[in-house]
Image: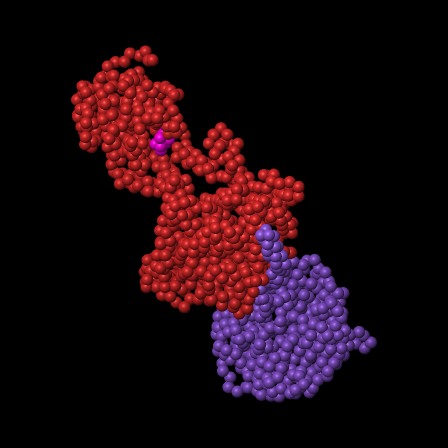
Chain colours: A red, B purple
Amino acid sequence: MSMTQTRQASVAAVVVTDDSGRLDATLTAVDQQVYGLGDVVVVGMATTIRAAAGGARLTISQTVAEAVETIGTSAEFLWIVAEGAIPKPDALSAAIRDADRTQAGIVGSKIIGADGSLISVGLVTDAFGVPYSGLDPSELDQGQYDVVRDVAAVSGIALLVRRDLLAGLGGVDALMARRAASIDLAQRARLKGARITVSPASEVIYDTEAHTDARWREEAGRIRGMIKVYSPLTLVWAVPLDFFLGFVEMIVSIFLGRWYGFDFVKSWGWNVVHFPNTVGARRRARAGRVVGDEELFRFQRRGSVKVARLSSDSMSALRSRLPGDDRLSVESIGDEIRQPAFVVGAFAVLFVLMAARNLWSDGFPAVGFTLPLPTSGSDVLNAYAGGWNPAGLGSADALRPLLAVAGVAKMITLNAATLPEYLLGAGAMLAGIWGMMRFLRTWSVSAAPGLIAGIVYVAGPAAQGIAGNTHLGTLLALGVLPWVLRLVVKPVADGSWAFLSRIAAVILTFGLLGALSPLLLIVPAPVIFIYAFFRFTNGDAWRAFILSLVGIAGGAMLLSPWIWSASFTRIARQGYAYWHLSSIVALAAAVVLVAAVLAGRRTLGLIAGWGALLAGIGLLGSRAGDFGYGTEFESAALAVMSLGVAIAIGVVAQSVTALDGGGWRRFVMGTGAVGVLFLVVASLTIILGGRIGLPGDRFTSAFEFAFATEGQAEISRILVVGPPELLPGDSRVIKGGAYRVVSASGPDLGEARLADPLELDERLEERLAMVISGDTKRAGGELAMFGIRWIVVMGDSRGQNTDPASAAWRDVFAGQLDLLPLTAAAENAVWVTDINPVSRALTTAGSAWPREGWTYQGEPEPGRRVFIAENPDDGWGPNPGLTTESMNEIAADDGIVVYTPNQGARTQAVFVLVFIVLLTGLAMWGRSRP
Amino acid sequence: MRRALLVLLAGFATVIGVIQVGPSPDEGPVFGTVDIAEPDGAVAKPSVWYCPWVEAGDVVDTDILVATDVDVDVSLSLLDPLTNEAPTVTGYSIVGSGAAGVDTGDLLRRGESPALVEISDGPASVASLEWADALISGDRCIVSVPKVWYLTGGSTRTGTLTELRLFNPFADNAEVTITAYSEFGVDLVAELDGLDVAGRSWTTVNMEPYLPFRDELAFTVTSTKGLVIPVIVRTDDRGEAMWPGSAPSETWDFPIVTTGGLEPFIAVLSAGGDEVVVSVDILTEDGSVRNAREVTIDSKVPTLIPLSDLAAPPFGVRLRATSPIAASVIAVVPVVEFDGGEGELPDDDTTTSTIEDLTTTIPETEEIFIRGLAGTIGIARPSSGWIVPIDTLPQNETTMWILNASGDAVTVEVVPLGEVEFHGGELTLTIEPGSIHGIEVDVGIGIFGYRVTADGPVSVAWEMAGERGAVLVAGVPDQ
């Protein structure tokens, strides 16, 4: 009990309605206050007021500001109470008492739910105005927070504010939602030097479910409040960072089953629309301030409430999805880290962090078919959707869907340099481990065996084979494949919506699988067919097979427009499939497979047999070069092999951990465990490189000479020759020698796959033939028309480790009269042309136009023409352009040359995008239904 | 049962997979580049010819001679002795069939300045001839650029100087290894291993400091990095001769080995590791002497085969060897024989003198002074068509020689080529089997080449002799 004498201040009550139909109860509670009230004003559009506060003069106003005006000047305090709030009879007197005692300008009440749970005892916010109550959900009021203290803000459900302060502040911001308005009011008051305290003795009961403002309105108000009170210096970092955090929240929340996209757009859009008004309000709020931002910061918590909340939610979601017999026990926070699910998850994350650590700083290495993502996400999406394919000398052929995935990753990360590559690489690896655990959980394989299987699946010898082939798409697809299989074999819940949701999810995941690795798109059907065939009487297995067929068909549709021009035969047959199988690895895998089949009981044994067959088929496919299959087929086959081996490992590990059986079975399991141990150790070796198994970068250093002279890389190309395995991406062959052309600014993923040769490609081949045959000794001049400034012979072209292909190409270019050597090294010999000017886009006046993104831009030259060294295509413009026999000739008047996308392909891509959004919505909606 | 079937199928797939074999090792591209040059000639396409021995100064001039069957544009580049300086480039056109000669002294006079001649079409061929009042030296230029060259006919005996000029017309630096062979076998010289030749430059290596007093010298020049075009330059007090490198062959034709009263020798080097039997056939205007001399040469030991005692000049030679050899002809001032004395090359101090000195040193002997030193490479493969750039100079006589080493008579059509269209001058003649035929070239009427067309394989070369000295130049076959 307080011993402070309470003076009898004059107080008027302002009851803010929200049409929740609880006004009567609130007015009654206000009327029952032991503290004598003056005026009572009801604010809002309440149409029925069935009761009035006895002894008080009841008036109705449209806004709080209007209410303040109607209240007599004798009122020293205003008590603002929300409709639905039920203040205890002594609530007002307690608030008045604490206001007097602390000399606070604003005093908030303790808000308690109808069930006795605490709703608010004052608020702390972060720097962005996001409130943080510090309370656990359903935390009961036991007086644990009953202390009068300064807070950043108080709840808008019931607060006492000095009338003169409120008038000086210009009242409550009517444009804001309730909570945002109360925080805003508190922050503005603090700027003016007022104290904001909470009075725990002032208790107000409130049912939170009765009224909640729209989330986006609260967000919009929060942003507006931030803009109003902070100094410009703070706003410079706070607003962009808040935008970014909101964007991240929107993305991450998708994975948590929430969709904040519209809230994000609407809240920022609202602020854009109301910006002039906000500027005016800011001027008023900061006029006459007596403290700075630092005083606001004093009552704020460090970090971001949003980030903390997302982290917590993500961990909760992760825990709920990790397999484990006793996963429900993780709800006990104290025992959390001792749970298998947590330990397994932490180990998986740690493994991925170590295995992908160099991607964080360097991104994907530029080697073989793995090349850095294009710089601009929008550019690459534009190119995918009917735009220009920049590989080689260019073409109108559709880019691989992998580029669309890359473009989306780039856009999401605001075109960050290496972040999207890290997210893709590490994310795929983590998804692969996680997916394998979930997949094996179908047959009750628990967390730890699933983790072991997952690690070998994404990092074992077969996965390393894929990485060694530098087939980035297939490597990333390892993260999707088990999810695809899990989705088709997992039982479907009853109900048509659940079924539709599953179909949507299946199509989406198949589409993603096909986008990453087209050949893997068709893999699940035969894989599941084998499964169903050997579980012939199992209806679920046959349903899974049908689902996989639906997934393939639907997923293929998502690969439009690429799918219509794609040749799976060509993809499968390019190169020579031959995976060099280590004897010891083969032995270890064979031991594991046999042990799994023998040791696994009942269904697990059959599943292990299925895995063994998949591994065998995968092995055969990975060495099927003699049957006409190529390296991409090899990588897809290795993925199947990795899947099969991982299944067997899961079975062995499960059997071992379950101590399932005795006698010979125990011996077999022990032997199998040795094999598993070997494969796990072999898998852990990828940690050394820190690039998810990918080889080291080859082209970044080999092509860095292009940047020695500023501006040359953007206008030039490099002719890269040598052994085909050392060239970036696809290559062409002339007289047994491999060659290809890449952008001098560094080939990106968009240039990895060459289209069929067109006119300019054929012209290049003719010129190269002349150079090779010795018909000309001026290779520089012959190659200048293609924008080729440099020639690089990859590999050792002389010395002890001379590669015959490198040496042969070196002999060709060493004997040229207009090529200057740039290096004396035996490896990666470089020549630069002695010809000038050389450019991919050259005007008739000899000016070089650099390539900027997917366009060429330079100084406008009215009346002149610019020659674009890309394969001739009518899409190059602006029109009227002239497509010559082997090149494009465009008017140089505008200073820019662009490619007009194919409208048909563009339309298809837009439809696919809409379809993906719909499928995502359907999948999530069905999943969120109880 | 199902498990067993699965394991069986898995095992079957695994076995099939394991027994698959990898791709055959990639042997690299087939670009036609070889270590050792095939016999090169004029082809019906653009070509670049390299002429390492070009000099124009206050005494010496060099003519660049281009003969062509078709209309061509010619770009003549003379390299600057200063590194990184752009070459001096002259362009001109020749209406085909035609030929033209350019005196580089008219373009610039800065001493040594190797040339490269780019011809826009073909067949065409190039030769260079260095001349002064008392000097002529030259040979056909080179069109193919192998990595390994064979050069024979060198010597560092007293009074004789042998140099190797290594011409690198390309931008890439070259690194070459010169292996020397003398009568002692392989003569190891560390300094000649890993010689650097900067791009677009040349270097001349005097062999005397490294290999003094060698009667016979031959070389192989191997490019370990980049490419060079070497020529051997032999000098004595009577003249200078230069000839390019060649590839080994089992057969060599020398349509003419005698010129200007010089004594001819054939310098050979076995390219293999075994002894080689070399047979010398002599072909004269009247017929041939098959197997006139047969010598067995050791591996890696250069050998000089004397010819002067086999026939009276003029005559040509066909060499036949049991395995590939490198060969060149070298013609020097003849040895003066003393009674009871050993034959040796003329010596100014003791055995020969100029006509002016004759009365004071050897009054009892009236000897005709012979000027000159000549040498050239052979022709490995006879051809039915030849495009022969030819030069003529006052005070000297030029003769083109056609050798028919086959067993049948051949009918040969000879068409002179020049800067203007010739009316007349064409010859049609028959060359009997095993004989040579000489065609004297008119001096001063603008003939700079010949087109030789035969109905059988022949070999062609030309020689010039007179007051300025003597020179032997190999012809260029039309391939």
Q: Is residue B165 above or below residue B65?
A: above
Counting labels gives 0
- Please tell me which residue is depicted at 56% across the width and 75% down the height of the picture: B42
Q: Position of residue A193 (x, y in %)?
A: 30, 23
Q: Position of residue A631 (x, y in %)?
A: 54, 57
Which sits in the foreground, A102 or A483? A483
Is residue B403 at all visible to an observer of this figure?
Answer: yes
Which sits in the foreground, B234 or B126? B126
Q: Position of residue A46 (x, y in %)?
A: 20, 31
> Is residue A556 on the magenta stretch?
no
As drawn, which residue projects farthest toward the right? B340
As drawn, which residue projects farthest toward the front? A537
Q: Position of residue A269 (x, y in %)?
A: 29, 41
Which sits in the foreground, A516 or A83? A83
On the picture, is B370 further left or further right than B13?
Answer: right
- Please tell me which residue is depicted at 47% across the width and 36% down the height of the picture: A319
Q: Is residue B411 above or below residue A9?
A: below
| Image quadrant where residue A191 sits | top left
> Is residue A129 on the magenta stretch?
yes
What secondary structure prevails in the magenta region?
loop
Q: Is residue B9 above or below residue A315?
A: below
On the picture, is A30 further left or further right than B476?
Answer: left
- Which stretch did the figure color magenta? A124-131
Quadrant of image for the C terminus of chain B: bottom right
On the picture, is A578 further left or further right than B192?
Answer: left
- Please tell me which residue is depicted at 46% across the width and 63% down the height of the picture: A756
Which sits in the foreground, A754 or A252? A252
On the picture, is A505 further left or further right than B139?
Answer: left
Is residue B110 at all visible to an observer of this figure?
Answer: no
